[in-house]
Every structure is written in structure tokens, then in C-alpha cells.
Amino acid sequence: MRYFFTLKWCIRYEKGAKEGTTVFNNITGYARPHTMLALLGGNQTSKVTLRKCLAGRIPVSSSLSGNLQANGLGIGTTFSRLIGYVEKLDAHQPYLSIRESHQFSAALRLGQEISATSRRIHVELVLNQLGLLPYSNELVGHLCNATGKTFEIAKKITIAVELVANPSILLLEEPISGFDANGTLAILNILSQVSNSGRVIISTLTHPNARTLSFFDLALILTQEGNQAYFGPVGFNCNDLLHYFTSIPKAPYYSRRDTPVRFIMGALGIGTKKRDTPSLNFSQIYQANSLCEMNNKEICNIKKSIKNIRRNCLSSTYPAPYSRQAILIEYKDIYGATSRTLYIHMQVILIGVISANNVIPQIGTGRLVYFREKRAGMYLPVFYPISWAVGEIPYFLVATLAVVGIGNGMAGIGTQSPSEFIKYWTVLFLFTLCLTYFGMMITFLAPVPTLAAFAVSVVTSLWVLASGVVVI
């Protein structure tokens, strides 16, 4: 099914009960599948408000007039299902793996008619498309330790979370902000692949270079006042965009030493370099240009072509039923968010703390024998505690290996590579051994085993309370 995006807006941002300030006015445009549209220029308020309106997120303190449609559907429940909105902030649950984050999004945002197997396959395809499969089992919060491309992967995760909802239109909020040249190129290549799959890409950009803007098919440029200065093709190396502005009478002179985007933004008075040019109303110039007439005809053709399309209107705001939402939220917040931390916490308590307490009655039982043998001068006294310390090593080697091999394998912790497995096993073995030696030391120093058990219990309880994990 092909989707079309027909846009025409007139927004007034209400600041009071009776008065309002026009944020932008008479904005027209369109986007077809396999198309990337860039939103440029304007002030921060107009660009942000325009982007939210395009996503159907009309600000509460504003009024919208005009026509905003996606495949013939106006703003509403069905319209919102067609839109994926990628925010600038890459906020994700740090205790979920990348795969779990996307499975959670897919389970809540795909329709009930899609089976669980199909959802899992869809998630794997999205992860593969965005190059996230090598990191799919990594915890989101541990990405900084997994790769040097932390910010690039975080942005890919944010994009993928929206793509698993299978939207027809993907809006992005400054997707390349803060990236270097390599990171920018990687994100733009991903967006090009997504666009080639039949989706519409709409993205806001702030002062992009010519190479970045050339990835986009169309550009919509606003003036400082929020009026439309241009809507049309970008062209290779921004040639089409540059030709339009340089052909305007009394337009500022374009120097080859200047970049196309910097020249256009400077001519509009909103660039990093403002110029002393004659006062030109670029909005009126565009309205009188043949390009505007061509765009209006194209919008009329799109409206006619989608007039007879059968539309399935949805009544429910959420794709997933309330029962599934409750279960999945509970899973994410209790199992997904804390399962790994709780598992590790219970693991060290089960092996370490219990071993430290279990060694007390064993040593306590042999204390009388040790004192008799010491008084008889049978051996050097230091060999007795050493024998206990050495004797525990093979036992804990096997015990921790069994726990890590079976338990961690089922929990998916520390089993991604042999080196990671050995590292986790070694740390757990040393921790358990040290905690057991602590119990031995208290037992040897205490006059009676009962007092040693009390001291070990108090110390380990304080350690558990200060560990940052609360089990309810």
C-alpha cells in the first residue's frame, strides 16, 4: 500500500486567551514514498512547532488550520499509527539489552493481528538493517564499554525503536546533531536505506553542509518570520537549490568560496553570516514563482490519486490491548530493568554470604581438636588455617563454574564470548573466596563460634543494605 503525505498548514501559537503570535503561515509541501525531506531555516520556535504539527502532535496552546494528511487520513488515531517520531534525546532503559528494547517497542506498537513470531522476525530485520545485530545482546547502559561509537549506536537505537513500529513516515529531530563527519555519514546512509524501503523521511537540520543536504530529495526552507521561502528539489551538491536563489533578481552575489547552505541562510538573514543585502521578501517571491505553482499542482494530483483509496480507521488509541500493556510494562520495569542486577545480587549472596556463614560451624567443630593438637606440639599452628584456606579453592572453583555455566547461560550474562565468561567466573570465584576467608578469620579470632556467626551476619547484612539493591 502506497502512502502519500499532503501538507498545508496555518498555525497560530496562542499565548493568551485572545491574542496569539503567528509561528508560521501558509506552508505547503508534499512527500512521496522513497523521498527524504529536509526542514531548514526559520527560528527555533517555528521549526520545532512545524515538526510537531507534521507528526500530529499539535501543541495545546496553539490552533491549527489548513490540511494535514497522510494517505488521505487527517490527524487522529489512525494518522498517529503512520508516524514514527525520532526525538533528539536518546533515552533508553539502561538495564535492557538492545534486542529487548526493540522487542518491547514492537510488542506494544504493532497490531494484534501480527503474531509473536512475526514480531521477533521483524525486530531482527530492523536490527540487521541498522547494523545493530553485533551489539543486540549488549545492555544499553554498557554501550560505552562495548564500542567507541557510543553516540552513533545510541542514535541508531532511537531510530530502530521507531522503525519496529513499521511507520510509513519517519520524522527526525536533528538526527545528526553532535556527530563528526563519519558519524553523520553513517546516520545519513541509514536514513537513505530506510527511505529506499518505501518510507517517507522528514528531518529538521541546522546549518548542514552541501554533502549532508544532498542526501535529501526535497527541502522546505522557512524565513525568520516563519514564512515559506522555498519548497523543491535539492539536487546534487545542492545545485537545484542554489540555482533557485541565485536566479532571484537583486539576490546577493554567490561566491564559489562560500558553501551553498551558508549562502542561502545568510541571504535569508538567519545564517551564521548575515549580509547587507536589499530587503527581499523571499516568501512573496516563492509564491509568485512557477515552482510554487508546480508544487500546488502536484498536491492537487496527490489529493485526486488518494481520493478513492480505502482507509481503515482505527478506534483504539493504542495498538496493544490494556492487558498486554500492563504485562509488558511490568516485565520491563521489574524483570527487564532489574533482573540482571537482581540475579547478580542474589548470586553473590547465595554463594558468598552463605559460604561465609557455613564455614563457621565447620571450623568451630574442629576448634577443640586444633587446641589439643597445638598444645601437643604436633605441627606449626599456622598450617591449620592454611589447610582450610587451600582446601576451599577446588571446591569453589567447581561451584562457581557450575553457577556461571548454568545460571549465567540461562540469564544471558557474561556468556557473549569465552574471555567474558572467564573474566566473570574469575571475579565471582575470587569474591566468594575472599568472603569465605573473611568468615574464617572471624571464626579464628572469636572466642566462641556463636559470637563469630553473629559478627559475620552483622557485617554481611550491612554490606547487603549498602549494595544499592532492595528485594521486596
Image: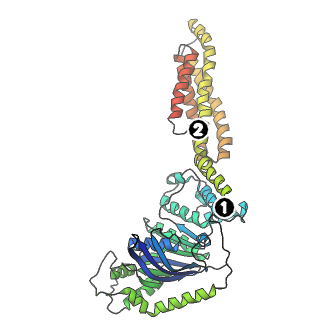
Q: Who comes first in sequence, dot 2 or dot 1?
A: 1
Find residue 259 and report its horizontal and vertical position in percent: 37, 80
> Among all residues in the image, which is located at the extreme top?
376
Q: Are marks 2 and 1 in contact (CB under 8 Å)?
A: no
Question: As displayed, is residue 57 above or below residue 210?
Answer: above
Residue picked out by circle 1: 320
For label 1, count other residues whose C-alpha is less than 10 Å away and answer few (under 14), some (14-19) or many (20+). some
Quadrant of the drawing holding the C terminus: top right
Q: In the rendered view, how is the structure colored?
A: rainbow
Quickly name the residue at label 2: 471
Given residues 42 and 15, the one toward you in this image is: 15
> Which quadrant would residue 267 be assigned to in this image?
bottom left
Q: Where is residue 347 in the image (x, y as percent from the top left)?
A: 61, 37
Residue 344 percent location from the top left of the image: 59, 40
> Given the image, on which type of amino acid does mark 1 rest?
Ala
Q: What residue type is labelled 2?
A: Val
Residue 9 as seen in the image, left or right of residue 5: left
Residue shown at the point (66%, 70%) measured from the top left: 314
Q: Which residue is drawn at 50% across and 78% down?
A: 37
Residue 237 seen in render: no
